[in-house]
Amino acid sequence: MAITMNGITFYRTSEVCRRAGVSRATLFRWFKRGILEDRMPRDRRGWRMYTSEDVNRIMLEAQVVKNRLETPRIT
């Protein structure tokens, strides 16, 4: 469920994962490994709030990984 504050729409982790087609564990692993920068603002509970730009960036990374896995190796 998206939340709008000061004209900016934010998404929760579950929504981002659903849109990108990755698990929560995968998303957090990408942050931990530095594949994605963990620069999202947090709500009062400390939960990440993702902008549309963040969601697009995560979806792009998910697509890159998917393409890498689907590309056959030439031997």
Image (cartoon, rainbow, N blue to C red):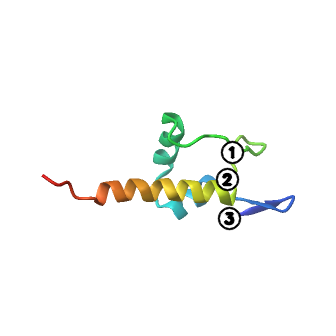
Marked residue nearer the N-terminal end (2 or 3) = 3
Q: How many marks?
A: 3
- Discs 2/3, front: 2
Q: Which residue is mark 3?
A: 1
Asked if residue 11 can be seen in this view, the reply is no
Residue for point 52% across, 35% down: 32
Instruction: Categorize mark 1 by other alpha carbons within 10 Å: few (<14), some (14-19), many (20+).
Output: few
Q: Is residue 4 left or right of residue 14?
A: right
Residue 71, percent from left and from top = 27, 59
Residue 61, percent from left and from top = 48, 53
Q: Which residue is mark 1?
A: 40
Q: Which residue is mark 2?
A: 50
Asked if residue 61 can be seen in this view, the reply is yes
Residue type (three-letter) at the residue carrying disc 2: Tyr
Residue type (three-letter) at the residue carrying disc 1: Met
Quadrant in which residue 44 is drawn: top right
Residue for point 53% across, 62% down: 18
Q: Give the numbered dot on residue 60.
A: none
* Tags 2 and 1 touching, CB below 8 Å: yes
Instruction: Categorize mark 3 by other alpha carbons within 10 Å: few (<14), some (14-19), many (20+).
Output: few
Residue 53, percent from left and from top = 66, 57
